[in-house]
Amino acid sequence: MNDAQLSKDDKALLDKFLADNRLFLGPDPEIMRNHGVQPRSALEERALATKLDPHQINHVRGLIHAALSESFTMVNQMGAAPGAKWGDLVTAIFTAQGDLAMIAPHGIITFAACCFYPIRFIIKNWVDDPTVGVKEGDGFIHNDARYGGVHNTDQSMMMPLYYKGQLVCWLSSTIHEGENGACEPGGLPAAAESKYDEGIKMSPFKVVENYQLKRDLVTFLQNSVRDPKLQLEDMKVKLHAVMRLGERITAILDQFGEELLTGTLRMHLEDTEAEVRRRIREMPDGTTRVLQFMDSTLRENALQKISCAITVKGDRMICDFRGSSPQFMNRSVNTNVASFKAALCTGLLQNIWPDLPHTMAVLSPIEILTDRNSVIDAEGEMPQAMSLMPMFKACVAWNVPMSKFNYSLPHRYTAILAPQYDQAATFIYGGLNQHGDVTGNFCGDINGMGQGARSHADGEHSVSPVFGFMADSGEHEINEEDTPIIRLGAQRIAKDRIGFGKYRGGMGYEQIATARGSGMWGFMTGCEGSKFSSAQGLFGGYSCPSYQLCKIKGVNIFDELKKNPRIVDVFDIVQLMNEQPLPGKYTSQDMGMTFELCTEGEVYMICQGAGGGYGDVLERDPELVMKDLREDLMSHENAVDIYKVVYDKEQLVVDVEATAELRSAERRARLARSKPYDEFVAEWVTPEPPKHLTYFGSWNDNREIWAQNPAINMTVKMDADKLQGFYMPNPKDLRIAELEGEVGALKSKLEACVSATKK
């Protein structure tokens, strides 16, 4: 019997039975694929029908911001996680339907831009569920990005706010907690080969009743991570920050009533959406494109294409990411589309329209197109622990194409800006600290990425993370009190590692670390950009360099310092690697490193990157070149070779005429080196990816996706609408096979020698 043969009553009974006996409430595609603002509720309609006083709305908006700022400061000051201390958190307010209305005037936009998904899940599934329910004093926790979020290291506390028995809004607090019980300490496991390696995966569930944490569930969560003290303390911190926020919002309700609060939140969303559509209409119609590449899965080198085409037509904007890399079945660099959209929202607010309110309505009018089962639209079973990799690309995806749209506008809302450095160049750590406690987390150096150059000025050095503009890079003294990590070099601007241009990108800093006082400690990194630049230049500017992870193993730097304290005079990565003044084995590798133990005194070195440059290097003011030389940001070799400046190296005085002649000669040399476009294309463009290249993504046609891994002699071409996951071999297995081959060859050679000797 099919549905059509059932009576109306039988059909209703069947539907109720199926609804009451669902096997699993997994991530809901209806929720996770909808980034738009919900239609007005009945309360919102009533509130806006009363023609609210705009002056009162502005006043209430200010009071809400003050309340959000206060609750943010509470978490920032009391939180135990390094992320809380360094500003990797946010507090936010949502409508009763779960639309993100406002966040604190500081903090990480992406966290809040993700949080409305789990709130919508709670509204849809738990409000009317007799075993769960939602009432005053309840609090829900969540961290699984598949239900909305960045990655499993971020934990959110969400509470409904009732007033006179009516739900009027939702409140939240989110912190990058770090440790979450994953297969590698610190919460960012590059070695995760499935979602079951990623640590605790909290779908939204109730952990607070009557404003009290439920101790049985708290104990379960503490038992699931390496740092139970951190888990407990920050659950308390987030809860009480949200409760304080609730007190402040209730005071606003007491003074102004629920209609004015509800109307303020709704108008904040609708006004923002209307303004975004107006700004889109200002732009010229057309399409601009940018290609980005992730160059590593954090386990092996592999070019993974992120394709982006932005089309404007009237008040419509379409962001088309079709043609991007397929998802990986056993690599953690996938992200789901909801998380990717949250990063897009962040980049739009941080780099293109920073004057707009920080609300989800900014992205609501924009259409997003992706290929299902791509690395930016991965399905639920794919590991996503290092979803930062494609999400960081989303944060800067706007810079190049939107700069082309906005360049000709008579009014700009911010400077034309080259892409910021977009990689997580920091140490993730774990083990037994000097106090005897097991812990794992990450260092705040990630929060100091170099800004891209601007159309009128150089970029700022190590200014902020690409995912939020108000966060600190952390105090190393605090870190050294809590962990065995000792900084041998920190926050030193990385000389010569520049995104050159008419205006140069802001520069990154070096980080040189070791461990002391623990017999069980280790490091890992989760970073790309060692083969392919992570920050593109704009309008002729250079991209940033590629960066390597460098190590000195088999040395105890503390013993060497006892012998010669002046050895610290050469603690510069380039100088150390070139001069090798210490004993031990010097190596360099890609910036993606899975967890490895660090013997006391061994040295690990990484570099935060520079932003992209803007404009032709030959147009840079020679005096700005001299300024960089005076500040020791650049070598004389680059001043001459890149910028073509003639000057007195002692006095740093420019020879204006000689410089003009040298630059003119370089322009003539460029013309001599140039080729007609068709000739260049004929020599450069190939019909398919070179066979030696580990490559994932479209090549000449976004409807065809390549997945090519020469390490296992496999090339697959798929239709974009029928993508499947690609399985990567374990690098250790490949290395074992390589060594076994070498051993076999040596055995054959030995046997041949023995045979020849007998003859």
Image: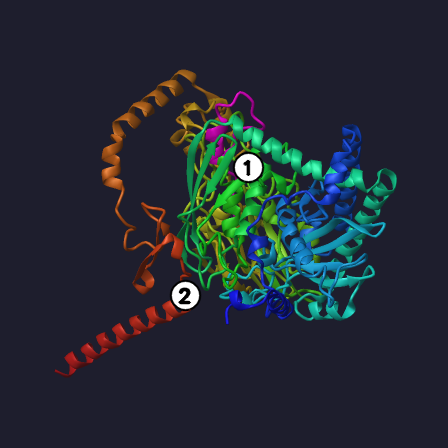
Magenta stretch holds residue 416: yes
Q: Is 135 on the left or on the right of 398, as rendered?
A: right
**Whole-percent x, y for residue 572 in the image:** 52, 46
Q: Is 455 on the left or on the right of 159, as rendered?
A: left
Q: Residue furthest top?
A: 657
Q: Which residue is mark 2?
A: 731
> Are discs 1 and 2 less than 8 Å apart at CB?
no
Badge number at residue 211: none
SS label for mark 1: loop
For the stretch drawn in magenta, what is the main secondary structure?
Answer: loop
Q: Residues within 10 Å of mark 1 (few under 14, many from 20)?
A: many
Q: Quadrant of residue 227?
A: bottom right
**Whole-percent x, y for residue 374 in the image:** 44, 54
Q: Residue at x 49, y 26 (%)?
A: 407
Q: Residue at x 57, y 34 (%)?
A: 460
**Whole-percent x, y for residue 344 in the image:** 54, 43
Q: Which residue is mark 1?
A: 451
Whether residue 727 is situated above or below residue 627 in the rendered picture: below
Whether residue 94 is situated above or below residue 595 in the rendered picture: above
The total of numbered circles placed on residues is: 2
State the residue in front, 216 or 624. Answer: 216
Q: Residue furthest right?
A: 254
Q: How is the image coloured?
A: rainbow
Spatial distance from mark 1 to mark 2, Cα to Cα?
34 Å
SS label for mark 2: helix
**Disc 1 residue type?**
Gln
Query: What stretch of residues is rendered in magenta?
Result: 400-423
Q: Residue furthest bottom?
A: 758
Q: Is 471 on the left or on the right of 685, as rendered?
A: right
Position of the C terminus, as image quadrant, is bottom left
Magenta stretch holds residue 330: no
